[in-house]
Image: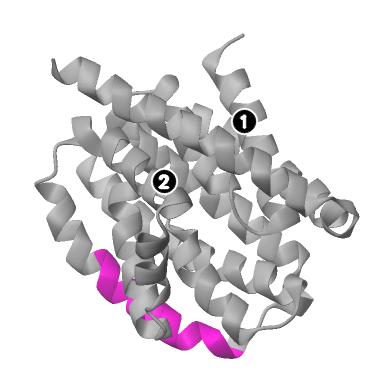
């Protein structure tokens, strides 16, 4: 199987998962990408694919989006992309998979870390951190999900509004990566395959949202993410030595 086919199928299933339960798809995708592509391409390609996944998920659930929450998040996202974009210029791309793996493990298994990131209750600050940190670790959806879960009471509203937030974050990230890496420009055919598959996954997942046992699915995703995160850290250490 070619890399494009494998990653296209991966984009489909991770987008399907995100459309059903509202999170996890982006984390799974960024944990799998380093197995098949160069470290410098992981976050740019992830950003393009997740932009399509989140934008399509928001489109298919547009009636549930809470638009009044968007302006402060958007303002914070613009500031975050500018500030963290400067930091990214001096960051060696070789160690990005390790940073992603550590972030995933802490977010999944370290309650103090989870409590720390959940205390950012301002949508301005959440927008800045979610978009800015996303330039470095790729997937930061839990930052806004923790706040949205406390603010909104409908699962469909949370999933749809989170999708719009992540769409904004990925739009803000992509211009930065197009300026600092030529690899994204050279991988547009791969990106097109993954984008198309992600949109299809969002379409099907949106319709399955109310028919799925989310508790069991979340448990499986948590353990799978942990194994993939450990693999990223191990692979980075092996390359270093």
Which residue carries the number 2 mark? 104
x and y percent of residue 68 in the render? Answer: 58, 91
Tell me which segment is drawn in magenta. Answer: 68-81
Q: Badge 1: how crowded within 10 Å, few (<14), some, or many (20+)? A: many
| Distance Cα–Cα, label 1 vs label 2 | 18 Å
Which residue occupies the foreground of this view, 27 or 225? 225
SS at mark 1 in the image = helix
Question: Quick check: 19 left or right of 83?
Answer: right
Q: Is residue 1 above or below residue 10?
A: above
Between disc 1 and disc 2, whose residue precedes?
A: 1
Viewport quadrant of the C terminus:
top left
Identify the residue at the far left of this view.
90
- Residue at the spot 43% in from the left edge and 21% down from the top edge: 35
Mark yes or no: residue 151 visible. yes
Q: Which residue is mark 1?
A: 10
Q: Residue furthest bottom?
A: 68
Depth check: give the residue in front, 240 or 29.
240
Residue drawn at x 52%, y 63% is 167
**Disc 2 secondary structure class:** helix
Q: Residue furthest top?
A: 1
The mark lying in front, picked from 1 and 2, is 2
């Amino acid at each position: 199987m070619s890399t494009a086919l494998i990653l296209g199928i991966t984009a489909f299933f991770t987008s399907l998962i995100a459309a059903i339960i509202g999170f996890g798809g982006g984390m799974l995708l960024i944990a799998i990408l380093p197995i098949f592509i160069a470290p410098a391409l992981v976050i740019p390609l992830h950003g393009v694919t997740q932009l399509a996944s989140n934008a399509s998920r928001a489109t298919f659930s547009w009636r549930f989006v809470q638009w009044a929450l968007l302006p402060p998040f958007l303002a914070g996202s613009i500031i975050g992309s500018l500030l963290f974009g400067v930091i990214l210029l001096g960051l060696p791309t070789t160690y990005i998979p390790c940073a992603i793996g550590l972030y995933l493990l802490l977010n999944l298994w370290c309650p103090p870390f989870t409590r720390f990131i959940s205390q950012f209750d301002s949508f301005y600050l959440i927008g800045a951190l979610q978009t800015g940190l996303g330039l470095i670790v790729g997937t930061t959806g839990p930052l806004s999900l923790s706040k949205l879960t406390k603010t909104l009471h409908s699962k469909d509203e949370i999933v749809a509004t989170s999708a719009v937030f992540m769409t904004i974050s990925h739009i803000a990230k992509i211009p930065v990566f197009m300026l600092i890496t030529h690899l994204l420009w050279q991988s547009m055919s791969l990106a097109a395959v993954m984008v198309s598959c992600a949109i299809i996954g969002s379409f099907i997942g949106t319709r399955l949202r109310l028919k799925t046992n989310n508790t069991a699915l979340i448990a499986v995703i948590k353990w799978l993410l942990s194994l993939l995160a450990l693999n990223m850290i191990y692979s980075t250490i092996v390359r270093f030595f």
